[in-house]
Image (spheres, rainbow, N blue to C red):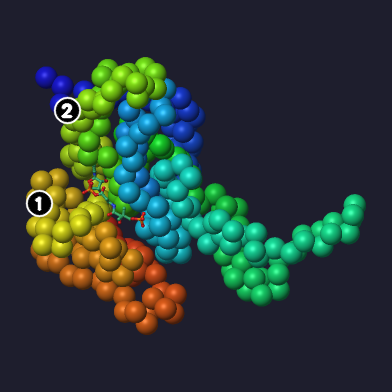
Amino acid sequence: MASHWEEFYATHLPPSDFEDNRTLLKEFCDRHNKCGQRIALITSGGTTVPLEHNTVRFVDNFSAGTRGAISAEYFLEHGYVVIFLHRLKSLEPFTRYFSGQKFMDMLELHDRGPNTTITVKPDSVDVLAPILASYKAVQEGGRILYVNFTTVSDYFWLLRAACECLAAYGPKAVLYLAAAVSDFYVPSNQLPTHKMQSGAGVPNIQLQLVPKLLAPLVSLWVPHAFVVSFKLETDETLLISKARDSLNKYKHKLVIGNILQTRRSKVVFVTPDNSYEVVLSREQMLNGMEIEDTIVSNVVLSHTDFIQSQKY
Ligand code: PMT
């Protein structure tokens, strides 16, 4: 009998650009593996669950993509190459500093008819220059691959394709699963084709459980990789026990727990042997420190130990 996750793949089509993305993933992974690089697959942003095939309405999962976008920059700083598997239009590394009006406000327009020019305001150059330099260096080195998803089923197909390419890295691969993945969905064969009509009365929507991908990911797809999952809760009393349940169930290396309201200043690392908090003070936050700096440094240290332990 097919498992729950196999059944999900059997009943949900891949996204239309799936083969293109699979080729890009393979090319990226093969190229960097030849050079002995460490690689991080970062998932980021929330998945959606459509309520109609021609989707007007959908259920979304909370995540701006901040954790994933910032973490990607720190993994790059530590010398990793990065696959950034993210929700379309969520925050991305480097450009995250310039979303909304911020970017426009950094520019100056010199309107001189046909000789019009645009410059960066002098006081913004100091901000933009180092970020632009890092961005250009990463782009020119081809060290990051951006792949995007919208629905939970896109995410499923792309995550498995990425894992198939990462398996060859063995312990050199880190999977850093920060995306907020839907836990409930409406199976494809139960979706109406067209937009639901309010005139038809109150809709009766029956959600079902999404299979947990961590199970096949850890045991079948990348059994030698260093897998880090995140756990988001809103009730503090549940966080550590839920994180530990997840470790016991899926047998991966680390769960990083966070509470919705305090996720920017506090996380808890839960490993099979212990748990400890990483906390940023108010002063550190005011000085522009980002908790992802410490999170990623700690993950990199544990990953290094893990690689060493696999050699003996
Ligand atoms: O982007 P930000 O606004 O900065 O917010 C960051 C964050 C709070 C979203 C992030 O830090 C975080 O906690 N991400 C994980 C949220 C989540 O989905 O937790 P979960 O309890 O639903 O899932 C736990 C783990 O199981 C996740 O690593 C997920 O990849 C995995 N999972 C979840 C559902 C599913 N069907 N299959 C899975 O494998």
Residue at mark 1: 245
Q: Is mark 1 within 8 Å of ligand 1?
A: no
Q: Amino acid at mark 1?
A: Asp
Q: Residue at x 26, y 19 (%)?
A: 190
Spatial separation of the CA atoms under disc 2 and disc 1: 20 Å
Q: Residue furthest bottom?
A: 283
Quadrant location of residue 273? bottom left
Quadrant location of residue 69? bottom left
User: Of residues 289 and 158, which is closer to you in this image?
Assistant: 289
Q: Is mark 2 within 8 Å of ligand 1?
A: no
Residue 126 in percent (x, y) is at 63, 74
Left or right of residue 19, residue 214 in this image: left
Q: Residue at x 32, y 28 (%)?
A: 51
Left or right of residue 266, residue 20 in this image: right
Q: Is residue 171 visible?
A: no
Numbered label attached to residue 128: none
Label 1 crowding class (10 Å Cα cut-off): few <14, some 14-19, many 20+? Answer: few
Q: Quadrant of the N terminus?
A: top left
Residue 19 to residue 114: above or below: above
Task: Identify the mark nearer the N-term, 2 or 1.
Answer: 2
Q: Is residue 180 visible?
A: yes
Q: Residue at x 34, y 21 (%)?
A: 199
Q: Quadrant of the C terminus?
A: bottom left
Residue 75 in percent (x, y) is at 41, 60
Residue 295 in percent (x, y) is at 31, 66
Numbered label attached to residue 4: 2
